Image (cartoon, rainbow, N blue to C red):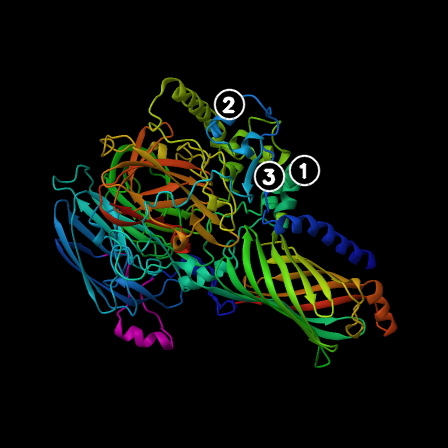
Amino acid sequence: MNTLSILAASVLVLGAAPTLAIAAGAQGQHVMEAAGAQPESGASPMKQAAAPAAMPMGAMDHGDMNMQGGSAPADARDPHAYSGGYTLDSGKYALAGPRQLRLADEHSFGTLLVDRLERVDTRDATSTAFDAQAWFGRDYDRLVVKAEGDYANGRLEEARTELLWGHAIASYWDAQLGLRYDTGEGPDRSWLAFGIQGLAPYWFELDATAYVGNEGRSALRVEAEYELPITQRLVLQPRGEINLYGKKDEANGMGSGLTDATFGLRLRYEVSRQFAPYIGVEWNNKFGQTADLARAEGASTRETRWVAGLRFWF
Amino acid sequence: MPARFSPIGIPVTLNRRRFVQGLAAGGVLAGLPGLLHAAADRAPSTVTGAAPVLRGTEIDLVVAESPVNFTGNPRMATTINGSIPAPTLRLREGDTVTIRVTNRLREATSIHWHGIILPYQMDGVPGISFAGIAPGETFTYRFKLEQTGTYWYHSHSGMQELTGMYGALIVESREGEPVRADRDYVVQLSDWTDEAPMQVFAKLKTQSDYYNYNQPTVADFFRDASTDGLKSAIAKRKMWNEMRMSPTDLADLSGATLTFLMNGTTPAGNWTGLFRRGERVRLRFINGAGNSFYDVRIPGLKMTVIQSDGVDVEPVTVDEFRFGPGETYDVLVEPKDDAYTLFAQAMDRSGYARGTLAVQPGLTAPVPALDKVEWLTMADMMGAMGGMAGMDHSAMAGGMKDMNHAAMPMQHNMPGMNHGAMAMDHSQHAMAENPLDKASQTVRHARTEYGPSTDMRVDMPRTNLDDPGIGLRNNGRRVLTLADLSTVGGPIDPRGAEREIELHLTGNMERYAWSLDGLEFGQSTPVHLRYGERVRVILHNDTMMTHPMHLHGMWSELETADGAFQARRHTIPVQPAQRISFLVTADALGRWAWHCHLMFHMDAGMFRQVVVS
């Protein structure tokens, strides 16, 4: 079990790092070396057809094809070039008054996704865990609320709630900025949050957020999920999470450095896309000072958790 | 899930067969529960299957809610004169018609006369041509018919088209019909959902593959690995997964929510057109669907296509044709047997609309099985580049080579086409030919295509018109393509293009955002055409879906990549990674709509305003 969770953690770190770098630069660029075998110089007929000399399409000239992401070349076409100065609601033949025609791009939508609402069984205890995310807004700017926590013995053991502004920065990535509030058995903590959430190549759903708290606290949380459809309705969801803290927070049982990593597998059956019961197993491992603190309290540093729950959204 | 969803998506018990096939008697009220009773008392149930025919120069249409039941679940539809489809208007060329439209809904409505050339104030697009028709109001449309052929009309307000507001509009020639046919049937295809359309839209905003139950699975992977080998199975998936694109992204909606209708009739209801042996039957196919492309065929019968979008074309005989929302095809058939199935499968193969041609009511013919779902090819994603990979084995990763076995027609067509194009490019410099003789091949992405609103761009599009499209390639049947269409009499305007306008069809499937040039309607500015000018429009598809692009008020005269006139259309389907061009004569002053006719793409913002002044 231990090896597994370490493995999961390292995969996450290694996998996330380059993606983070890319997304932070709002790139998410997918470069395909499609014409790699063509000569670098000389008048390849194909190149001439696609990119006549008048169009300095840098990517093409180098034999690459940028199908996704990237930044616009200096001579990219102006999307308003054909307007002749007209706007949607001014100029000849425009209807009087404010613009009436507003399509869905100017309407707000919203969703509450309860990704996990589950009963958790370990050797020592049972508890109830939740992990939900809601958003409201438009395609490129939205309000995001994230909430995750555990109940045991009728008490809220720990909960993390985040209120964020999400702003689309690339095809598959949103930057998020806002606040996080932790509550539970230990003292409450509040943080400023900045992160990115989106879809990495090969369909990894990634959520990485850095936090700055008071008294010099800092934290980093990286979560990744993958959806593996076994059939059209049976979906295996591997999920990993790691947490790092910049400063020891003994009252909350956190050391500095890598505190814990979790790797889980959940198998759900989609009765509908919006309603899916699941079962699963999860391995959690505490590290370093955090593990020491747990040991001092007589708690275990590794845990195997059996889970059963519901995933739903509306 | 072939079921209705309660608020959180737990399916209400519903027999699968009944959902897919629909009820046999769609319009008949059967046991309406509570809420609907009150409405049902007031509104008689919707007439389906046989649209009444209205003729003359004075027509009254009333828009109201009326109950329907296509699936076993009673619902309210928005209808015109209480029927689905709406009455077939048979009008006469040269007549000035007065059509009074009364709105008895609780929301505004409108009617757009799709494909009819008329003054912009009569075009029926709320917010562009007029203010719309408020509840309780009557709006009087008046326009002169200066064309002939098969057209249609529908609401241009919200999602009312998807909830029942569509009908056929036929303009008969003053000199009498040039085509002799013993029978003449409108075959209007549409789609219906029991869900509220905006709720469907909202679901797609949250999960864009919500209705796709043909997704690649682990089970598929192992099947591929055992038949083609592990390496090949991985290669087949690598590019798609790396790019976060789905090879089965063929339609946004599917049989998981849609019931496919032919003349307002479910497949089980089996709309039937009668004929006598030896007769010649004209079928006027209209795609009035909200969001479905249909592949239409009549097993056992050849179809001779004689008209496309209301305009006569040189007759061409085919087994099958694909058309998207907004397009029409008129075909002639000469049935010899007792019964034939009119089979219209949805492009994503999640269901079909079906009817019968028979010598007497009650006869049926076998209904073919749905074709299997085909994955999109590299050519659908990358255009000519996808096709080229097949030739240049050293250039591509193994994955792409493997995929290109499936990317067939372009492999053969594109290289030739590119060489031709190159030759022309050189000659342009050498001999100073008019550079506007044919569409520019230079791909010019808008600067707004490099952000979150798009998920891909095609740098080397395909420009051939002879691709029937995904799922129809090499299927053993003769399938109509745009290259087969040749409008009788040539273009309406002999002038060449004076300038070019390039627009890119763009989207981000993951966000379910659709736009032109990466800009949704709300952020866009109009496209201005100078009154009287002849302009070339280049539509360049930077997505993996086919978009039926409908320009209001003016004809779109489709041309080949070499600049040769092909066909006059009002709705032009642009395939994935395709670059297509057409000429427009800007002879219609005013403001017009121009949009993808897939309703959900239109509503997402794949929409422009056009100003002619």
> Would you say the residues marked 3 and 2 are in contact, meaning their CB atoms lie under 8 Å apart?
no
**Highlighted range, magenta:** B26-51
Numbered badge on residue A45: 2
Q: Secondary structure at mark 2?
A: helix
User: Quadrant of residue A41 in the image?
Assistant: top right
Q: Residue at x 40, y 21 (%)?
A: B429
Q: What residue does disc 3 label?
A: A31
Inspect the image, locate mark 2, and give the three-letter code of the amino acid beneath it. Answer: Pro
Inspect the image, locate mark 3, and give the three-letter code of the amino acid beneath it. Answer: Val
Q: Identify the image quadrant of the C terminus of chain B.
A: top left
- Chain containing mark 3: A
Q: Residue at x 23, y 41 (%)?
A: B531
Q: Does A38 sit above or below residue B102?
A: above
Q: Are marks 3 and 2 on the same chain?
A: yes
Q: Secondary structure at mark 1?
A: helix
User: Quadrant of residue A146 in the image?
Assistant: bottom right
User: Quadrant of residue A94 in the image?
Assistant: bottom left
Instruction: Name the residue at the front extreme.
Output: A215
Q: What residue does disc 1 label?
A: B231
